[in-house]
Image (cartoon, grey):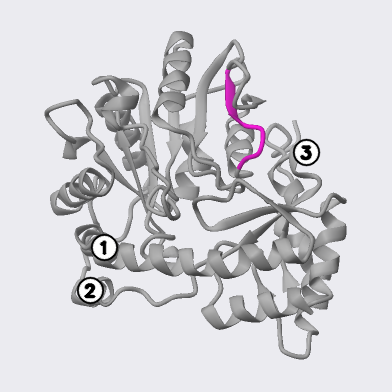
Amino acid sequence: MTVGARRALPDFPWDSLAGAAAVARSHHDGVVDLSVGTPVDPVPDAVGEALRAAWDSPGYPQTWGTPALREAAVGALARRHGAGLSGTEGLDPDAVLPTIGSKELVAWLPTLLGLGPDDVVAFPHLAYPTYEVGARLAGTRTATVHDDEPLPPGARLVWLNSPSNPTGRVLDAGRLADRVAEARALGAVVASDECYLALPGPGVVTTSVLDPAVHGGDVAGLLAVHSLSKTSNLAGYRAGLVLGDPVLVADLLQTRKHAGMIVPRPVQEAMTAALRDDEHVAATRARYDARRAVLRPALEAAGLRVEHSEAGLYLWATAGERCRATVDRLAARGILVAPGEFYGPAGASHVRVALTASDERIAAAAERLAG
């Protein structure tokens, strides 16, 4: 067998934007890059101070994370989202595991769970591409599922994502509970990608899969995946978490110990500081809400229809044409966006527009759209 044949991966999607990026960069006032959800705002002071204070860390860190980090994660999820591992006892710090960003966990979770060719990984029909990449790495089958469709037989891992990347759509507690019940009937693990949970948008309520209203007091088979990249501007720190079913988390911990999947100790200290502080999260949320309020009407005035997009970091828009045509038209105005086809065939006529640019660049994009 040719090395790598079993796990042949697609080309990295953003590499295909090179041409459009070159056109956008040629704009006389520079590019407004709204193609990738990478934060541009400063790291919170308390986080930077914690990182600097832990610089002298010569020994190996704990794969499980420090007790302080795990307790801070428990506190943050309870305070910010009212989530608990049981209806009355609250969250369990033993069921928390830091990860090297959330993408790493998403990509390797099917492998870490021991899934193989007879298993199915199911994910939304419009979805973060790494769900499929993770399935390919493990050699499993895949199935894309619309919100109103049943889960496929043979599903052993079911990805949920609310708020959604790319659409910003939010699933309420009732819909999440229905999916959890359906997955449990199949014996599937539910992994909820909650990286945008703390960015609900004005008047929007987001719900964790670890909320008792969803799991009914039993977290068996449930994992919630969290990231500090968006809410705390820590994309460069690679700071993520997975938490939920204590049995599943303990199994992941043992495998990750063997594989050396360890978050560096200074980053663990920075994560602890970020999880203890809610003020910077509120400021981040307000900042993105303001950018959404500028960019969404500008896109609509320019003839694009914005769908969902009530939460998270993106506007999901269509001009009723092939997504690449929209990408090219916007690139000619110096605005770079992501083609919707990156997220599945159902996105072929949409583009994803990120809010992760400075206020000045967002204003520049709105002005260009009006021109």
The answer to whether marks 1 and 2 mark residues whose Cβ atoms lie closer than 8 Å is: yes
Q: What secondary structure is found at the residue carrying circle 3? A: helix
Magenta-colored span: 119-127
Disc 2 residue crowd, few under 14, some 14–19, many 20+, Cα 10 Å:
some
In three-dimensional space, the C-alpha distance between marks 3 and 1, rounded to whole angstroms, equals: 37 Å
The residue that disc 1 covers is 274
Amino acid on which disc 2 is placed: Ala
User: Is 125 a magenta residue?
Assistant: yes
In three-dimensional space, the C-alpha distance between marks 3 and 2, rounded to whole angstroms, equals: 42 Å
The residue under the point 50% across, 24% down is: 157
Please name whichever residue, 363 or 135, is drawn nearer the observer in this view of the structure.
Answer: 363
In three-dimensional space, the C-alpha distance between marks 1 and 2, rounded to whole angstroms, equals: 7 Å
The residue that disc 2 covers is 46
In what quadrant of the picture does the C terminus appear?
Answer: bottom right
Q: Position of residue 189 (x, y in %)?
A: 43, 22
The residue under the point 45% across, 19% down is: 178
Q: Is residue 332 visible?
A: yes
